Image (cartoon, helix red, strand yellow):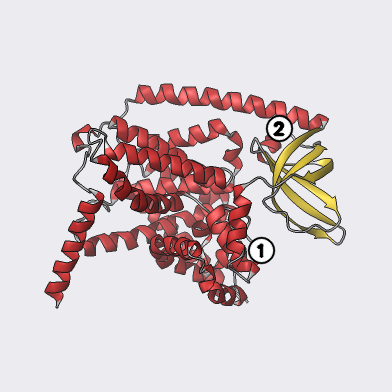
């Protein structure tokens, strides 16, 4: 029985390789994997810093205009009741600037809709403006709905009776604002990184895209066999990713992942080594050259930190080249456990919430590569409501949270050790010890709650 199963799996893998032309079509040889000279990096980074300065100059002009009072178009990122007579709105204009305003009255849910805003800012420095500012003497009016995003949200909403389920899936697929009760559950279970769209989601989406497009491409490829299939499919994947990026309004974490995908494609085309810490710096500067305000976006900072620790893991653990399935599975579990621990001190500088239930995020992160495509497929088939009862029961469960911010005296040495880990293995070992100690401290605080 076991022998028959083994033969079946081997035949299935062989058929899959033949169907998708894996290891058959053009493939770069390892001897092309070269590094970019440091002086070339210096030139590229200098140009990006120049572009970043131009972006800052344009931001400053916008800042001066807002101090005088202007009218502009923006999107309502979220709004909530401030007191009995007014609500607080968060706007994001077409240049990526974040502005907050208070308005009297009660408003229906207009999150994700476009508005025309008039107002001015004061008592706000330019440095504060790069992060966010309050807008005063302000009025706004709704603009006609011309976004495909609203149609997708409505498509999701039609499959759910629960507003919480609609909100969860809209946030998961379209990067909309997450409801307060769902944010509490996400913090309690450590699922924020799975709900917030990032490079993890981009990887899964591209895998689904290639699974669908590759067979069609190779049917045509036999007539154009001189084409390099890997580069053609890579370009198609980037076009698909860009369309999705525009759909979710250039969500910062996904934007960073898209830039890294573009840089990775170019470097793959040129035969340059991809997994390089200089390349991470390069991608970060490219994103900041487009919008320097990303430097103050928590999701963007956590996204960059996550990729940094992933690169460290790849440096010290050869997770990809392991041939044995058992060893590969062990490395995948080890990868999720280590990244989970290493990210906690960084995340707790911004979000102090801790729960022992956050360990659930480790197996869920492993299963998410299957779960995320499954959720997309059942929604496309119109059966998105299947897990609604589970979502409701989880949201209704009371989770106890402790709060502990990462102290600056711990964070700075932790970051220094993280940077030293690029060069020294002993620093990487010390990094993991520090992460484990910090997690233990949070456990002690959690279990001593009254």
Horizontal side, residue 153 vs residue 225: left or right? right
Pointer 2 local density, CA inside 10 Å: few below 14, some 14–19, many at least 20: some
Which residue corresponds to mark 2?
A: 126
Front residue of 52/155: it is 155
Quadrant assignment, res 70: top right
How many labels were placed on the picture?
A: 2
Identify the residue at horizontal 27%, vertical 32% (top origin): 271
Of the 4 image quadrants, the one containing the C terminus is bottom right
Which residue was labeled with disc 1? 180
Give x and y (percent) for residue 186.
Answer: 56, 64
Check disc 1: other Cα within 10 Å, few if <14, some if 14-19, many if 20+: few
* Residue 430, visible in the rendered structure: yes
Percent x, y of residue 232: 33, 37
**Residue 403 visible in image:** no
The image quarter containing residue 55 is top right
Relative depth, front residue between 427 and 284: 284
Q: Is residue 354 above or below residue 36?
A: below
Please name the residue shown 65% across and 35% down the image: 95
Q: Nearer the viewer, mark 2 or mark 1?
A: 1
| Rendered-image quadrant of the N terminus | bottom left
Give the Cα distance between marks 2 and 1. Answer: 30 Å
Check the image and name the residue furthest to the left: 3
Q: Quadrant of residue 66?
A: top right
Residue 425 or 63: which is nearer the viewer? 63
Q: Is residue 319 left or right of residue 345?
A: left
Residue 90 image position (x, y, % from top left)? 72, 48
Going 60% across and 50% down the picture, which residue do you hit? 149
Q: Secondary structure at mark 2?
A: helix
Residue appearing at x 39%, y 55% in the figure = 432
Residue 375, above or below 252 = below
């Amino acid at each position: 029985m076991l022998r028959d199963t083994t033969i079946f799996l081997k035949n299935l893998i062989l058929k899959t390789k033949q169907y998708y032309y894996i290891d058959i079509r053009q493939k770069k040889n390892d001897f092309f994997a070269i590094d970019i000279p440091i002086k070339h990096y210096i030139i590229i980074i200098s140009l990006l810093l120049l572009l970043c300065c131009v972006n800052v100059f344009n931001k400053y002009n916008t800042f001066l205009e807002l101090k005088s009072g202007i009218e502009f178009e923006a999107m309502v990122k979220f709004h909530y009741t401030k007191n009995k007579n007014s609500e607080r709105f968060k706007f994001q204009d077409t240049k990526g600037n974040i502005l907050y305003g208070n308005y009297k009255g009660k408003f229906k849910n207009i999150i994700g809709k476009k508005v025309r805003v008039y107002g001015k800012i004061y008592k706000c420095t330019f440095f504060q403006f790069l992060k966010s500012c309050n807008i005063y003497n302000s009025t706004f009016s709704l603009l006609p709905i011309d976004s495909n995003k609203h149609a997708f949200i409505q498509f999701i909403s039609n499959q759910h009776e629960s507003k919480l389920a609609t909100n969860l899936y809209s946030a998961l697929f379209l990067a909309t604002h997450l409801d307060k009760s769902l944010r509490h559950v996400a913090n309690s279970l450590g699922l924020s990184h799975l709900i917030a769209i990032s490079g993890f989601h981009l990887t899964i989406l591209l895998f689904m895209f290639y699974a669908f497009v590759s067979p069609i491409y190779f049917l045509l490829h036999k007539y154009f066999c001189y084409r390099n299939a890997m580069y053609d499919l890579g370009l198609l994947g980037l076009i698909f990713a860009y369309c999705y990026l525009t759909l979710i309004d250039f969500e910062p974490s996904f934007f960073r992942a898209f830039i890294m995908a573009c840089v990775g494609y170019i470097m793959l085309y040129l035969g340059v080594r991809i997994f390089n810490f200089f390349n991470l710096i390069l991608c970060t500067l490219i994103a900041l050259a487009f919008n320097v305000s990303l430097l103050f976006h928590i999701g963007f900072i956590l996204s960059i930190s996550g990729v940094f620790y992933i690169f460290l893991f790849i440096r010290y653990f050869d997770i990809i080249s392991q041939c044995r399935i058992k060893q590969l599975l062990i490395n995948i579990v080890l990868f999720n456990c280590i990244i989970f621990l290493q990210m906690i001190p960084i995340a707790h500088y911004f979000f102090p919430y801790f729960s022992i239930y956050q360990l659930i995020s480790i197996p869920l992160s492993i299963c998410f590569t299957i779960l995320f495509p499954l959720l997309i497929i059942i929604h496309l088939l119109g059966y998105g409501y299947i897990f609604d009862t589970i979502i409701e029961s989880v949201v209704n469960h009371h989770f106890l949270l402790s709060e502990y911010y990462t102290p600056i005296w711990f964070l700075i040495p932790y970051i220094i050790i993280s940077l030293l880990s690029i060069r020294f293995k002993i620093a990487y070992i010390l990094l993991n010890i520090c992460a484990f100690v910090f997690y233990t401290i949070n456990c002690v605080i959690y279990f001593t709650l009254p």
